[in-house]
Amino acid sequence: MNTKTSVMPTVAVAPGAVAKNAGASPSVQLLLKYVVWIWLVGLVIVFGLLNKFFFTTSNLQNILTQATVLGLLGLAASLPLLVGEIDLSIAGNMGISSAIGALAILQLHMPTFLGVIVGVGAATLIGFFNGLCITRLRMVSLIETLGMMIILQGGLLAITQGATITDFTDAYTWVGQTTVGGWPVMPLVLFVGFIGMAVLLRRTVFGRKLYATGGNAAAAHVAGIRVNKVKIVAFTLSGFIAGIAGYFLASWQMAITSDQGEGFLLYSIAAPIIGGVSVFGGRGDTWGILGGVLLLTVIHVGLAVVNVPSFYVDMIGGFLIFIAVAVDAIRVGMGGTR
């Protein structure tokens, strides 16, 4: 009992808490915690001054709609990061699962709802398999999910035969095309998803186990937490959310290409990191992830609105990731440990 008592304070870290150090002033702590929102507000003002179209209702709707798929993928990427792992296969998972669901509807003549479930179910199983490989076979998550990403990309190319899948039913594209009062439905689902994730991380025992596992897996194990089980569930939920994102993307674009989702990989991982999810695990919160998603989306849309050539976007995105990782290292340094 004495051993458990001594380690419990180490693992019972409040979700999203930023470690404090006597040498760090409260103002610096506050700046590092909310830096993503400061960037976001600043960029919105700059883009709005450069082009008044940026503040129009139609552009706001465009930003929120584009942020939906990236936001869901950002949530999917954040779960492995919180337990100190990484999943590079989520974009590939998103692409192939949407194709599986669509082909089940178009070729096997399944009802639309059942076909969507099949696609999301396939994505969930892929996430579960990743978790098993990483925990039971002790494979390095970076390498295992990189290999899985290549397999899924090749699998998508094989099942589509290089062609684009179209001719969806109206029921399939309803989520991506429907508006209520002139506003698209997709962003509503995004915010519901973020609220659900916030409740999961802050109000449930499993959420606390996620933070404990990522903060110190050895101490969490000694405290009685089944670390491997927590990681498997994290990867399984990540796959599930990636499957939903895949359906949303296909419904919005009304098409599934042979390279569906490949362009999302970099930004789906960048969004939570920029939003404060630590690459070392154990830290980060849902609203920071939302800030990272909105920041990257505003950059994409804003650069297009002010007529900046698109090939600069990736460079700027990489620069932001560099800054975000540097800020995270500073934040971790203030805590005195990694």
Image (tube, rainbow, N blue to C red):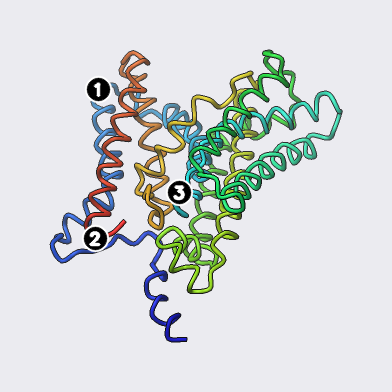
Q: Secondary structure at mark 1?
A: helix
Q: Which mark is residue 336?
A: 2
Is 321 situated above or below 311? below
| CA separation in Å, label 3 and label 1 | 36 Å
Amino acid carrying mark 3 in the image: Leu
Q: Please give the residue where the numbered disc 1 appears in the rendered image.
A: 50
Q: Would you identify the image quadrant in which residue 217 lies?
A: bottom left
Which marked residue is nearer to the observer: mark 3 or mark 1?
3
x 24%, y 37%: residue: 42
Front in this rendered view, residue 135 or 286: 135
- Are the residues tagged 3 and 2 within 8 Å (C-beta)? no
Which marked residue is nearer to the observer: mark 3 or mark 2?
2
Left or right: 98 in relation to 194: right
x 47%, y 28%: residue: 62
x%, y% of residue 290?
42, 45
| CA separation in Å, label 1 and label 2 | 42 Å
Q: Please give the residue where the numbered disc 3 appears in the rendered image.
A: 81
x%, y% of residue 234?
56, 53
- Are the residues tagged 3 and 1 within 8 Å (C-beta)? no
